[in-house]
Image: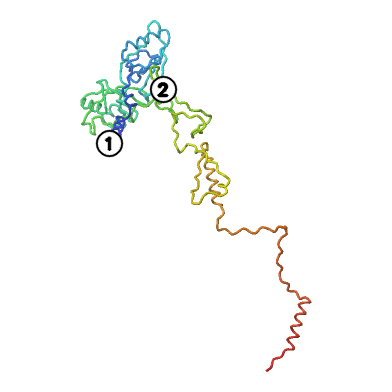
Amino acid sequence: MSTMFGALNRFISRLDSESPSQSSRDRSAYGFQVLRNKNLEIPIEPWYDFIVGINGRQVDNPDPNLFATEVRNCAGSTVSLILWNAKGQRTRTLALPIPTPSPTLGITLQWTPLSVTEDVWHVLDVIPNSPADNAGLLSYGDYIVGTPEGNVHGESGLGELVEDYLSRNLRLFVYNHEYAVTRLITLTPSRSWGGSGALGCVLGFGALHRLPAPMTEPIAGPGETLFETARFSNEEHRPPSTQPQSQSPSYYPPPSSAPQSSDYLVPASLASPPPAPPQSATSLAAGPPKGARKPRSVAAPNMTFDDYFREGEQKSKEEDFAPSNKAAAPPPPPPKGGKAPPQAKSPDLTPGPDREREENKIEESGGTESVDG
């Protein structure tokens, strides 16, 4: 299992290194990381929150004096902070009142790249009676986010730190996703605890093991944006694409007569077919040319699935009950006079005068004839 996760993590890391400029731009983003919050009334979480904007403008200068001056200028009013949180990698806006006597926020900041939050190790499995088990690590819910012993960078950073602290106490900051708490644990890495590894746990690292959003936040629905991005007044303005809204969701492109935005690419298979050219009366009477292919029916642009299946069912019924070319010829039409054809009479077997007269002739002729011996 650990080999499979290791190979998958290396593959994800290789994809991250080969990602386009968007990924490199996110990795190079900076902000003021909140290291300490002395004002408990401010809903700012140390280590996880980064201040990336103030009063609608992006923070692009590492000078803390400029940031403090902007806060003091808002004395007696409110200051708008744009915060980026490592849990779920989401952005939110927070408005805080600034008192006049002491125009400060009561927080300690440090200019830090946002990529430091990627150095997180997800605890996937804990072996019983191992150093990790004795320290209280929990599988799947715990994330190792740092250590007071120093900075740890990269996938191999934690392994190198563990090797330096073999048979010594090592302190680690661990965040639990299920309880949304961060605790400090102490463990003693060892090679002689009776199992494999110095910690006795399976760790995951990479894009699949980032800190998830808190469980108290609503789950994103289908079609919603998973990662939110902040827009600042000093950024290049990007006009949003406009799309005509309707009461019911449409799964097909609008007709060609409606104005379409250039931001959308309509696939050829979904585009409505062009109108057929007009046909003359002689071509309609002659019928389709011999050897021509049967035209393929194309679904209408605004046809729903029920209409599509209903049309297919109707075509199937017409093909099943279509008359064959080898069927018997239909009966002839009735005469023009409107009278029914005469019915054939059965022969009369009752004796009559004509029949008796014929029998008498046969008897007379038979009596007069003689045969010579």
Quadrant of res 110? top left
* Residue beneath the point at 39% across and 8% down: 73
Q: Is residue 160 above or below residue 327?
A: above
- In the structure shown, which secondary structural element does the residue marked by tag 2 occupy? loop
Horizontal side of 367 relative to 210 (left or right) equals right
- Tag 2: amino acid: Arg
- Residue situated in front as seen by the camera: 70 or 362: 362
- Give the image location of residue 121, x and y in percent: 30, 28
- Residue situated in front as seen by the camera: 24 or 357: 357
Horizontal side of 19 relative to 238 (left or right) equals left
- Give the image location of residue 65, x and y in percent: 32, 10
Q: Is residue 169 above or below residue 271?
A: above
What number is the disc on residue 32?
none
- Give the image location of residue 307, x and y in percent: 54, 40
Q: Is residue 357 above or below residue 137?
A: below
- Tag 1: amino acid: Thr
Q: Which numbered disc flags the more N-terminal residue, 1 or 2?
A: 1
- Residue situated in front as seen by the camera: 200 or 314: 314
Q: Is residue 60 above or below residue 321?
A: above
Quadrant of res 117? top left
Q: Residues within 10 Å of mark 1 (few under 14, many from 20)?
A: few
Q: Residues within 10 Å of mark 2 (few under 14, many from 20)?
A: few
- Residue situated in front as seen by the camera: 247 or 226: 247
Disc 2 marks which residue?
238
Work out which quarter of the rendered image holds the C terminus and state it.
bottom right
Work out which quarter of the rendered image holds the N terminus and state it.
top left
Disc 1 marks which residue?
3
* Residue beneath the point at 52% across and 29% down: 246
* Residue beneath the point at 57% across and 49% down: 285
Outermost residue to the bottom: 373
Horizontal side of 214 relative to 362 (left or right) equals left
- Give the image location of residue 113, x and y in percent: 31, 20
